[in-house]
Image (cartoon, rainbow, N blue to C red):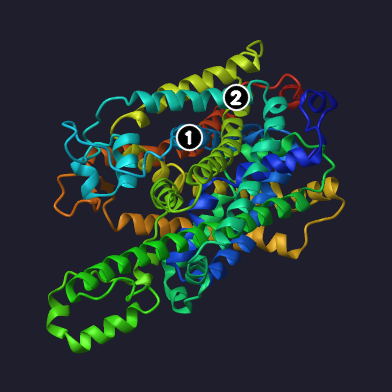
């Protein structure tokens, strides 16, 4: 690959320093999913045992892909579309696919940030609004829906989302969510108004602040009663679970998505580097920091969830103590939490008939610890409920949602960068249009389309986008990326590029991963993922107060028209890959046929034929 031209290098913006670049990459990779997805997977898949497939996926899939993107972006100094078109015009669709995925993900991801802002604003109330049920319309009793579920559930599903009973009932726009979404996009626009100059400054706060908050939560969480139970539950390995192939599939997809590869943002970020920069070290720093953050976040999260489980366990026992004390006329304070088991066993032996008729609850700490949740369920239900039990709950709620806001904001920088810079390279926008105007158009368009997520059915659509836009399309894009660099551009050329940038050629580990291991793993994960999805019709959990098992969510199948949209969301981003390839094939065929049809004036074949004919005539 030839060296970049000086004129191109001068036009390309540059990072102020190496720390700014690394913080931006780390901020993009480390997102909300590190806090609410990874701990959940550890919990349901055997605690410490899950780390084995997770680390294997990191070493043989995550890091090689991350290194490849940072290296190719730095060498060619272009965004996703420019990089793949430079390698081969046939691969231009890969860059377009990355851009479309980034745009679709940015729309629903910023809705989550809007929800975080709503909770943040409400965290200043005393008491916290999700701590108790509101009164009904007649002000004579508590709201029925809230009493059937919990105040935390009611605040999330009714006060925040005002959710409809199914995805087919759209409901109306919720004005408070529209305002929060507008605020979220306004913040993104302000941070992105000058491009790298502005978000490069913001990242010093957004990428570092979450670590400060996590550390504060870690110190506080470890001092709470029951924290040890939560950590033991999280990290106790269940080796039998490793026999389940779903564990390996989830580990591979988690490390892939958490590193934010295939979005195009990392390629754009690395393109602002100097050409001679150690991108191998950068990849290791970003990849290891991302995984370490997931582990680090698990400790305060589950120490607090352990505290919540212990509190619920003790409250359950206190209710039983009150029932036993009243029925058997036992003096107050005789039965305590410490001697509860002894009293319970004693009364079972002496009064088995009475004990069998009493409405005693089954209090099992393990059952309370088993109440796992991920995604919005962890952030807006489980964790907010745990915060209520902590002294100074307002302050902890504010800190938690500020942390989620910072994590989401730094991830959004990469998504928007993966849209705006490729738009410039596609030349869809005239050069005279300033960056401020282009950023404003992208943010405004995203906001207007994103209004679908502020409807009563908005949460269901967020789940659709989250489940399907960022899954199969990204796996396909990543597969074509690694094939494009290693087998189209060529391993030998790529090794020379890396030698030019770092002063050393890639070792056998990197070469083996790029040429065989990583593409094989990606292909296996892609096929397994599609196969698992194809075996079952997609369903979604609906919040329906009329459901007979309410407050449990009702599992409903997606309607056919929604299923059609799901297929469209999977196909639409990646359809550009075959289309662009086919277009270039047709163009090449037309060019070749036109060359054959018209004689080349610089070719002497015509002259030679004439002279031969002249010779024959002479003879």
Look at 44% across and 74% down and name the residue there.
Answer: 241
Q: Who is closer to the viewer here, 386 or 523?
A: 386
The local secondary structure at tag 1 comes to loop
Q: Quadrant of residue 61?
A: bottom right
Q: Is residue 463 left or right of residue 616?
A: left
Answer few, some or many: residues within 10 Å of disc 2's Cα (few below 14, many 20 plus, some between 14 and 19): few
Q: How many other residues sit within 10 Å of disc 1, few (<14), some (14-19) or many (≥20)?
A: some
Which numbered tag is attached to residue 38?
Answer: none
In percent of the image, x 40 and y 66: which residue is there? Answer: 369
Image x and y of residue 605, in percent: 73, 27
Residue at image location 20% in from the left, 74% down from the top: 329
* Residue 515 position (above or below residue 19): below
Residue 272 coordinates in the image, percent (x, y): 75, 34
Answer yes or no: is residue 619 visible: no
From the viewer's perspective, tell me whether residue 357 is left or right of residue 614. left
Query: Which residue is nearer to you in this view: 352 or 301?
Result: 352
Residue furthest front as drawn? 331
Q: Earlier in the sequence, mark 1 or mark 2?
A: 1
Q: CA distance from mark 1 to mark 2?
A: 46 Å
- Side of 587 where 377 appears, left or right: left
Q: Which mark is residue 124?
A: 1
Q: Nearer the viewer, mark 1 or mark 2?
A: 1
Q: Position of residue 142 (x, y in %)?
A: 21, 41
Q: Nearer the viewer, residue 514 or 43?
A: 43
> Percent from the top left, x then y, of residue 320?
26, 69
Reading the image, the residue beneath label 2 is 426
Q: Is residue 91 above or below residue 231?
A: above
Q: Quadrant of the N terminus?
A: top right
Q: Relative to the observer, which residue lies in front, 311 or 279? A: 311
């Amino acid at each position: 690959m030839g060296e970049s031209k000086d004129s191109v290098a001068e036009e390309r913006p540059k990072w102020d320093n190496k720390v700014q670049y690394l913080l931006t990459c780390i901020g993009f990779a480390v997102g909300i999913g590190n806090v609410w997805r990874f701990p959940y997977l550890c919990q349901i898949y055997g605690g410490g045992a899950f780390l084995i497939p997770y680390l294997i996926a990191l070493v043989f899939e995550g890091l090689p892909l991350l290194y490849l993107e940072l290296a190719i972006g730095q060498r060619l100094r272009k965004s996703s579309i420019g990089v793949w078109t430079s390698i081969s015009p046939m691969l231009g669709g890969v860059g377009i696919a990355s851009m479309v995925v980034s745009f679709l993900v940015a729309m629903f991801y910023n809705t989550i940030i809007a929800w975080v802002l709503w909770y943040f604003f409400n965290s200043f109330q005393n008491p916290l609004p999700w701590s108790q049920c509101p009164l009904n319309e007649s002000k004579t009793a508590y709201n029925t829906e809230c009493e059937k579920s919990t105040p935390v559930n009611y605040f999330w599903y009714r006060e925040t989302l005002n959710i409809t009973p199914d995805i087919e009932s759209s409901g109306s726009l919720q004005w408070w969510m529209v305002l929060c979404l507008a605020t979220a996009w306004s913040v993104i626009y302000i941070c992105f108004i000058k491009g790298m100059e502005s978000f490069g400054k913001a990242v010093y706060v957004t990428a570092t602040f979450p670590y400060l908050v996590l550390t504060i939560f870690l110190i506080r969480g470890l001092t709470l009663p029951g924290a040890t139970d939560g950590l033991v539950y999280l990290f106790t390995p269940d080796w039998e679970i490793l026999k389940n192939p779903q564990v390996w599939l989830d580990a591979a997809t988690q490390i892939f998505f958490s590193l934010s590869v295939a979005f195009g943002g990392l390629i754009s970020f690395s393109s602002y580097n100097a050409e001679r920069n150690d991108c191998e070290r950068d990849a290791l720093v970003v990849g290891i920091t991302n995984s370490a953050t997931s582990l680090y976040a698990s400790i305060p999260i589950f120490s607090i969830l352990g505290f919540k489980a212990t509190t619920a366990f003790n409250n359950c026992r206190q209710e039983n103590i009150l029932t036993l004390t009243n029925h058997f006329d036992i003096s107050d304070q005789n039965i305590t939490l410490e001697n509860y088991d002894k009293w319970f066993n004693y009364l079972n032996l002496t009064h088995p008939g009475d004990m069998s008729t009493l409405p005693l609850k089954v209090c099992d700490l393990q059952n309370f610890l088993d109440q796992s949740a991920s995604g919005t369920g962890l952030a807006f239900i489980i964790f907010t409920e745990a915060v209520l039990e902590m002294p100074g709950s307002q302050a902890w709620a504010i800190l938690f949602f500020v942390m989620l806001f910072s994590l989401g904001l730094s991830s959004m920088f990469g998504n928007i960068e993966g849209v705006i810079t490729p738009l410039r390279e596609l030349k869809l926008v005239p050069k005279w249009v300033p960056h401020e105007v282009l950023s404003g158009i992208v943010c405004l368009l995203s906001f207007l389309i994103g209004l679908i997520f502020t409807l009563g059915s908005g949460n269901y659509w967020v789940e659709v986008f989250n489940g399907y836009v960022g899954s199969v399309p990204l796996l396909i894009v990543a597969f074509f990326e690694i094939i494009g660099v290693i087998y189209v551009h060529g391993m030998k050329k790529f090794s020379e590029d890396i030698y030019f940038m770092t002063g050393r050629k890639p070792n056998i580990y990197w070469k083996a991963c790029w040429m065989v291991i990583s593409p094989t793993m990606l292909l296996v994960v892609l096929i397994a993922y599609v196969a698992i999805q194809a075996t079952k019709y997609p369903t979604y959990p609906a919040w329906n107060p009329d459901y007979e098992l309410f407050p449990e969510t009702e599992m409903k199948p997606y309607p056919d028209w929604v299923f059609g949209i799901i297929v469209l969301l999977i196909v639409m981003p990646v359809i550009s890959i075959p289309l662009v390839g086919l277009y270039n094939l047709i163009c090449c065929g037309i060019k070749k046929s036109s060359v054959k049809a018209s004689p080349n004036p610089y070719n002497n074949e015509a002259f030679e034929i004439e002279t031969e004919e002249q010779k024959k005539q002479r003879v």
